[in-house]
Image (tube, grey):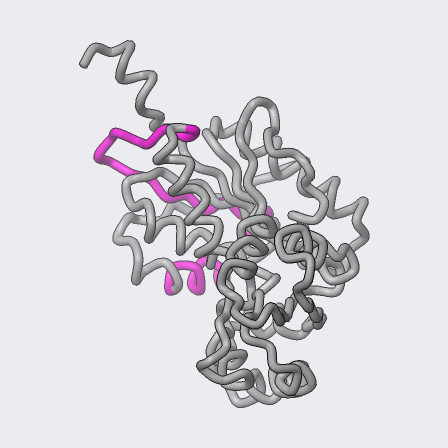
Amino acid sequence: MNLKTDSLEFDARPIGVFDSGIGGITVLRELVKAFPEENFIYLGDTARLPYGSKSAETVRKYSLQNMKFLMSRDVKAMIVACNTASTQVFEDHFENTPVYNVIDPGSALAAAKTLNKKIAVLATRATIKAGSYVKKIHAILPDAEVLSQACPLFVPLAEEGWHDDPITNLIAFRYLQNLKTSDIDTVVLGCTHYPLIKSAIQKVFGNHVQLIDSGEAVALQIKSDFLSQKLKRNSNRDVSLMIALTDSSEHFENLSSQLLAPVSDTKICFETVSVI
């Protein structure tokens, strides 16, 4: 193959992923597991987390700054690995680069998985207020019953690393006990932090209820776009995995390393950056 053909079929640039904190690492983990040959750069806006309690205007401003930062690192695609930010990022392209949110694929997967058309959405207050999941799911399944529950304490529990803890189990039961009686068969984890406490959520609903993970859903969409050549794969054997933080955090570095270790043996490079 000549160099010109190679340049058309392959793209060694990294895939950019951003979130306010540790939650987006669950999306990165699924992407790294699905595409181990790809380069990734993850931006954690740790200086300004959480996004879920901030106004829509502020979240939009932060998201644009994050995307501009990722563009400065020459990414070939961007994943908005934050449900709250996904409600305020309306573009499917930014500066001619594809942008993926986590709400569209999560909604589509929930609609495809439900058998009785009774779906629950667990998310931050900002995501629930935006109503994005309800609108997207109803666009696919107009007769679906979609119930929403804000679970704001799930984020600090996940950030603290209390993923399998009696306190987490108690708080999960407190938030979800009313939903449990509604015959729901599918639950959307509408915050990327929530897969970190998936076991506590599953204990409340039972194993017969399907939990929809945003990371798994967006990985399926990326896979489809690789197959269709909308995105070009990396052809290099050496891969890189970088995590950039807007505020240095030893806790974040340790926890993200633990979460990524089972799916990648690539050395993680950490960097403190400014996006303003």
Q: How many marks?
A: 0
Looking at the image, residue 225 sits to the left or right of residue 92; the answer is left
- Give the image location of residue 188, x and y in percent: 57, 65
In the image, 5 versus 120, the foreground residue is: 120
In the image, 186 versus 90, the foreground residue is: 186
- Give the image location of residue 33, x and y in percent: 33, 53
In the image, 122 versus 138, the foreground residue is: 138
Q: Residue at x 69, y 85 (%)?
A: 178
Image quadrant of residue 129? Answer: bottom right
Name the quadrant of the N terminus: top left
Q: Residue at x 44, y 56 (%)?
A: 216
Residue 232, magenta (yes or no): yes
Can residue 249 be seen? no
- Give the image location of residue 226, x and y in percent: 37, 35
Q: Is residue 68 above or below residue 217?
A: above
Image quadrant of residue 120? Answer: bottom right
In the image, 254 versus 93, the foreground residue is: 93
Looking at the image, residue 67 sits to the left or right of residue 198; the answer is right
- Give the image location of residue 29, x and y in percent: 40, 55
Q: Residue at x 49, y 76 (%)?
A: 163
Residue 206, magenta (yes or no): no
Name the quadrant of the C terminus: top right
Can residue 24 be seen? yes
Q: Residue at x 49, y 69 (%)?
A: 196
The magenta stretch is 230-258
Q: Is residue 150 above or below residue 276?
A: below
